[in-house]
Amino acid sequence: MDAELARTLEPYRGQKGALITVLQKIQEKLGYLPKDLFIDVARLCRISINEVYGVASFYAQFRFTAPGRHGVKVCLGTACHVRGGQRILESVERDVGVSSGGTSSDGRYSLERVACFGSCALAPVVVVDKDVYGRMTPAKAKDVLSKYE
């Protein structure tokens, strides 16, 4: 664990109930939870490494792989689904070479499927980083992704 992260986590030393907060702080700084830090977290919170892994793997908010430089989210909420969201997701998976929930081998993209963005009038929706793209098609999604690095 680097010194800056250790300083950030020091206020939680010995606090078993702070585990989720500690994991959130690590992910906030690094973008994911490296498994090699679980021993340090267990020592910090004075719990077993199994407890750390159990909590980290239980909550969907935590990820164990480094995120890509660009986060791609494809909506599969009802409006997006009926307007071809699944087709778009499959097309993006093929185009970037990664399944939903993963990161492309070149580290360029992380891909997620989400339940709803609340932009149903624009369905189907793809979000890249913080940019929202509506009325997507597989071809439009490919064009959008080509603009990112």
Image (cartoon, grey):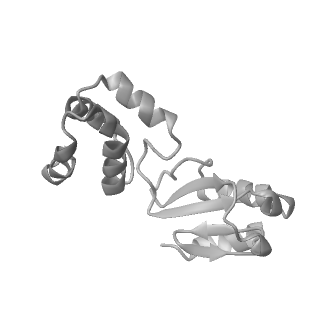
Q: Answer with the quarter of the image where residue 14 lies.
A: top left
Within the image, what quadrant is residue 120 found in? bottom right
Residue lying at 53% horizontally and 43% vertically, measured from the top left: 60
x%, y% of residue 148?
Answer: 52, 73
Q: Is residue 104 left or right of residue 78?
A: left
Q: Residue furthest right?
A: 82
Q: Residue at x 78, y 55 (%)?
A: 86
Q: Does residue 62 appear to the left or right of 121 in the view shown?
A: left
Point out the image quarter for the N terminus.
top left
Q: Residue at image x 44%, y 54%? A: 67
Q: Position of residue 116 (x, y in %)?
A: 69, 60
Of residues 103 and 116, the one drawn nearer to the viewer in this rendering: 116
Question: Residue 39 occupies which quadrant of the picture?
Answer: top left
Q: How many marks?
A: 0
Q: Position of residue 123 (x, y in %)?
A: 78, 70
Percent from the top left, x then y, of residue 33? Answer: 37, 43
Name the residue rendered at 40%, 50% in the picture. Answer: 66
Is 148 in front, or is 8? Answer: 8
User: Can you say whether 32 is above or below 53 in the image?
Assistant: below
| 86 on left or right of 39 | right
